[in-house]
Amino acid sequence: MNATTHATVRCQQRGVSPFVIDLLLRFGRREHDHHGAEIVFFDRRARKAVDSYTGGTIGKLNEQMDSYAVVSEGCVITVGVRHQKINRH
């Protein structure tokens, strides 16, 4: 995972493990944020793919499945936890 210092600090502050960030980057849905970056998050299809990939053990990470990452040029800029839907316009 190529991440900025800011993203690393945000992961620690928000309790998002590097494993979840790797799953996000591998399976997450990508939406443009209209500022030159992408928001990567788990939608229903991504959650099913992660569940299949981990053999059903994703239930232990359920509280981290609302995480998202902002990615620009292959680098994770920041990480957060969703409290509302991602705007897809």
Image: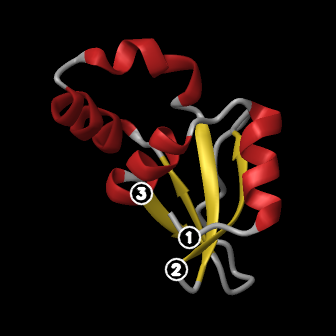
Closer to the camera in the image, 22 or 30: 22
Please, is residue 47 above or below residue 29 in the view? Answer: above
Label 3 Cα neighbours within 10 Å, binned few <14 / some 14-19 / many ≥20: some
Quarter holding the C terminus is bottom right
56 and 6: which is toward the camera: 6
What residue did someone put label 1 on?
A: 2
Between marks 3 and 2 in the image, the one whose residue lies nearer the viewer: 2
Residue mark closest to the camera, 3 vs 1? 1
Residue 62 spot, x, y in % from top left:
48, 19
Viewer-side residue, 87 vs 60: 60
Please give the name of the residue rendered at 43% of the width and 13% of the height, measured from the top-left corner. Answer: 60
Whichever of labels 3 and 1 marks the residue nearer the N terminus, that label is 1
In terms of secondary structure, where does tag 3 sit?
strand
Q: Tell me how far mark 3 sits from mark 1, CA to CA.
A: 18 Å
SS under mark 1 = loop
Q: Is residue 30 left or right of residue 64?
A: left
Q: Residues within 10 Å of mark 2 (few under 14, many from 20)?
A: few
Label 1 or label 2, whichever comes before in sequence order: 1
Question: Which amino acid, by three-letter code, is at mark 1?
Answer: Asn
Q: Residue at 38% of width from left, 13% of height from top?
A: 59
Residue with the mark numbered 3: 29
Q: Are marks 3 and 2 in contact (CB under 8 Å)?
A: no
Tell me: residue 8, above or below residue 57.
Answer: below
Mark 1 crowdedness (10 Å alpha carbons): few <14, some 14-19, many ≥20? few
Dot 2 lies on which element?
A: loop
Residue 74 is marked as 2
Badge 1 vs badge 2, beta-carbon distance below 8 Å = yes
